[in-house]
Amino acid sequence: MRKKYDYCIYIGRFQPFHLGHLQTVRIALEEASELIIVIGSHRTAPNIKNPWTSSQREQMIRLTLKDEPNLLERIHFAPVRDQLYSDNLWVADIQQKVLAIAGDESAIAIIGHRKDESSYYLDSFPQWSYIETGNYRDIHSTDIRAAYLSRAPEATYYDKLPVGVQVSLSAFQSEARFGELCAEYDFIQHNQKAWSVAPYPPTFVTVDAVVVQSGHVLIVRRKSRYGSGLYALPGGFVDQDETLLEGMLRELKEETGLKVPMPVLRGSIVDSHVFDNPSRSLRGRTITHAYFIQLKAGKLPPVKGGDDADKALWMSLADLYIHEDLFFEDHFAIVLHFVSRV
Ligand code: NAD
């Protein structure tokens, strides 16, 4: 029988894919001939909010439906990056991916559940009909991740997961990354508990240096428990007795040992910008002030990791794109912000 829509669009993070998501997939395939699952937060570095890559998440969905090939063959997967500082770019990316699969003549609906204010994006596609699914069994990915990463007994959350996802999560426990994410989860819990006695929720202020020379960006590799092993900009928390500029220059010297005289560094600052997306850091509300330092072309000055960085390196802009999924918080977006302007 002909369905009401040619395509249904289902956007989500699916970290992990649970029975509420599965219920929506089933409703979508009742309503439409084909389903496009947009897997969000593509190429985000692994963290406790996004433990699994988009291909691992697609695999979880495929495993869940492996005994229903008639459904699986009607599903398309479209991984989409976050654009933390431009909803327009994010919407444009989804529009293009849907157009490439569905063409411009199809009857299309977007399906989802307005669970809270974070579901605002469902209103960004007025050209498509909207199907509201309602809430299924009050299941939340956040609760499942909390139980999983705090190593709670499987019985406390397995009943919210399709068997295929249970198998995937169980296999992931033997990977080194699982241990790292559990340690990060404990660290963040501990940190939040320590701050819970403050009279107001804290807002942290940090500074970052984006130093560019001859097509290379100065990058560090983090050694702190939070974001350990990820690439980041040199930077950190501002001390009580320094200005933002002084804090940025101090962190830059401490973490990279950059051998460029201070007056040259100060004179090479060509731009600065505040990055304040409320969800940019999992440690708590953190606003960063980033400075763009453009050095004269020539031989790259020597650098050496120090303080919170176990390594400092000049990364070519080509490598920057290759390693996008190894960048801490929004640091990849911060670099792009400056290098696409100057
Ligand atoms: P999610 O996996 O939490 O939820 C996906 C969908 O399933 C949502 O409609 C949600 O309401 C629904 N759902 C969840 N639990 C349910 C249940 N128990 N019963 C019924 N429905 C349920 O994913 P999400 O966080 O909503 O995904 C949005 C994605 O879009 C993310 O990757 C986010 O980063 C991205 N995004 C990006 C931008 C940007 O980059 N500018 C802006 C908005 C959203």
Image: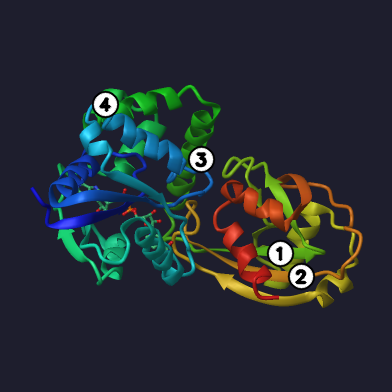
Q: Can you identify the residue that label 2 sits on?
A: 293
Q: Residue at x 46, y 50 (%)?
A: 42
Measured in 3D between alpha carbons, the distance from the residue under mark 1 to the one under mark 3, in whole angstroms, is 27 Å
* N-term-proximal mark, 1 vs 3: 3
Q: Looking at the image, is mark 2 or mark 3 earlier in the sequence?
A: 3
> Residue at the left extreme?
1
Q: CA distance from mark 4 to mark 3?
A: 30 Å
Cα separation between marks 4 and 2: 51 Å
CA gap, disc 1 and disc 2: 6 Å
Dot 2 beta carbon under 8 Å from ligand 1: no
Dot 4, crowdedness within 10 Å: few (<14), some or many (≥20)?
Answer: some
Check disc 4 and report the residue beneath it: 163
Q: Residue at x 24, y 43 (%)?
A: 21
Q: Earlier in the sequence, mark 1 or mark 2?
A: 1
Rendered image: mark on residue 177? none
Q: Are there few (<14), some (14-19), or many (20+) residues within 10 Å of tag 2?
A: many
Where 76 falls versus 82 (above or below)? above
Amino acid type, mark 2: Ile
Determine the residue positioned at 17% across, 57% down.
5
Badge 1 vs badge 2, beta-carbon distance below 8 Å: yes
**Can residue 289 be spotted in the picture?**
yes
